[in-house]
Image: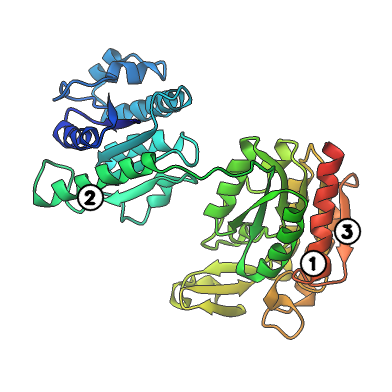
């Protein structure tokens, strides 16, 4: 039997959360009702009161309530939930979480969910689940967002079915047992379609050496997720050969991973091999969505939904400086590998983005700005050549070996 947290504003949405809790209990699980409401008294008795939730963040609920500032109240309850829920999970007092809400409820519920470990069952039924800013609520965690279809405002023929599905889904998550597997040390790797061969070849070598390799697609969210996992201390090594997200961050593409990309391994003493994979491209959506300021640049239609733009020599020089500056932060063993023949499939000779001047601007900037203490290797190969991927894997294994 599992205990499932049912978190929500039990003053305005108590009936709905009570309905879900009842369905969960009918399947043999227990529930822990947590009240995040800040308006009227709750319509059903919670197991964890709003006062307790606020207190988890060091906030006096009475004073908060007197100010009647909804924005402040939502922020306070979100903070309390993000502190209390991980504690309950660590103590095995809850085994999953479900929440229902509109804007405020979604902000509170997903704040709690983002604070929980990857793999911990979490389900948010939200009026915002189909909106364009879902990433703001999910972050880099495995939060399942279920559209409420109708507003979370009472029980009706539509909402009953949606809420029943939610109850069944969260129960199914906590009931699912993960098959036993060997706990091998973890290596994380960044990959893009244009560096797939490289990472796949390196992955084989690393797995043969006894590691489990987790590959993250360098699409902004993927880079952030990889960095977040490195921060947990569970990672033995980083094969970060696809640093393309920095091109989007610098130039204004749609797959940026934020200004802290490339810092997790550096700050946490984790052995890393870094490469300039796909820094030749900036990602945009369909051709019609590209900002007018880029008119006249070289583009390549990767698919109907994705258009790539070739980075210029000036942009490449700045990207080289950024990459070097980030690597220079490293407290642990690190190597930078430069595949001088091509940094992606389409930058190789005869391909659409082949531009030796831009590549040379990138490589020269990296070499000029990189600390002399950092191991730097230039390899006369494309990034997807077996020789390059083999060297990358072997260098990383060597760095990890030095640490051991």
Checking the image for residue 249, the label placed there is none
Residue situated furthest right in the rendering = 372
Which mark lies nearer to you, 1 or 3? 3
Checking the image for residue 377, the label placed there is 3
Residue positioned 32% across, 42% down in the render: 170
Q: How far apart in space, not on screen, are marks 1 and 3 (Cα)? A: 16 Å
Q: In this orientation, which residue lies closer to the viewer: 328 or 142?
A: 142
Along the polypeptide, which appears first: circle 3 or circle 2? 2
Q: Quadrant of residue 7?
A: top left
Name the image quarter holding the N terminus.
top left
Q: Residues within 10 Å of mark 2 (few under 14, many from 20)?
A: many
Along the polypeptide, which appears first: circle 1 or circle 3? 1
Relative horizontal placement of residue 94, taking residue 374 as reference (left or right)? left
Which mark lies nearer to you, 3 or 2? 2
Residue positioned 20% across, 35% down in the render: 26
Residue situated furthest front in the rendering = 180
* Element type at mark 1: helix
Checking the image for residue 148, the label placed there is 2
Which mark lies nearer to you, 1 or 2? 2
Q: Quadrant of residue 233?
A: top right
Checking the image for residue 361, the label placed there is 1
């Amino acid at each position: 039997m599992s205990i499932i947290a049912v978190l929500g504003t039990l003053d305005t949405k108590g009936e709905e959360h009570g309905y879900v809790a009842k369905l969960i209990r009918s399947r043999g699980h227990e529930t822990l009702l947590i009240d995040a409401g800040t308006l009227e008294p709750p319509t059903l008795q919670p197991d964890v009161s709003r006062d307790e939730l606020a207190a988890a963040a060091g906030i006096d609920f009475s004073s908060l309530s007197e100010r009647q500032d909804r924005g402040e109240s939502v922020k306070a309850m979100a903070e309390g939930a993000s502190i209390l829920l991980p504690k309950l999970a660590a103590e095995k007092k809850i085994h999953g979480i479900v929440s229902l809400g509109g804007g405020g409820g979604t902000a509170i519920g997903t704040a709690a969910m983002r604070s929980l470990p990857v793999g911990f069952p979490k389900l948010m039924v939200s009026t915002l689940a189909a909106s364009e800013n879902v990433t703001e609520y999910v972050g880099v965690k495995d939060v399942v967002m279920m559209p409420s279809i109708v507003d979370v405002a009472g029980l009706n023929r539509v909402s009953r079915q949606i809420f029943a599905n939610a109850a069944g889904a969260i129960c199914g998550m906590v009931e699912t047992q993960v098959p036993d597997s060997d706990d091998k040390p973890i290596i994380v790797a960044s990959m893009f379609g244009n560096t797939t061969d490289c990472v796949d070849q390196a992955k084989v070598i690393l797995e043969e050496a006894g590691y489990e390799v987790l590959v993250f697609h360098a699409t902004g969210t993927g880079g952030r997720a990889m960095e977040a996992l490195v921060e947990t201390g569970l990672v033995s090594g980083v094969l970060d050969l696809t640093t393309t997200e920095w091109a989007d961050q610098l130039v204004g593409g749609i797959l940026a991973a934020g200004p802290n990309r490339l810092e997790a391994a550096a700050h946490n003493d984790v052995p890393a091999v870094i490469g300039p994979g796909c820094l030749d491209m900036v990602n945009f959506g369909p051709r019609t969505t590209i900002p007018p300021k880029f008119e006249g640049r070289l583009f390549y239609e990767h698919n109907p939904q994705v258009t790539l733009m070739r980075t210029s020599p000036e942009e490449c020089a700045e990207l080289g400086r950024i990459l070097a500056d980030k690597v220079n932060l490293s407290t642990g063993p690190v190597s930078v590998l430069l595949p001088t023949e091509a940094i992606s499939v389409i930058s190789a000779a005869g391909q659409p983005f082949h531009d030796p001047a831009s590549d040379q601007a990138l490589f020269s900037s990296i070499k000029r700005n990189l600390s002399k203490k950092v191991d730097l290797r230039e390899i006369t190969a494309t990034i997807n050549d077996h020789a390059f991927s083999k060297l990358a894997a072997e260098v990383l294994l060597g760095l990890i070996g030095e640490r051991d």
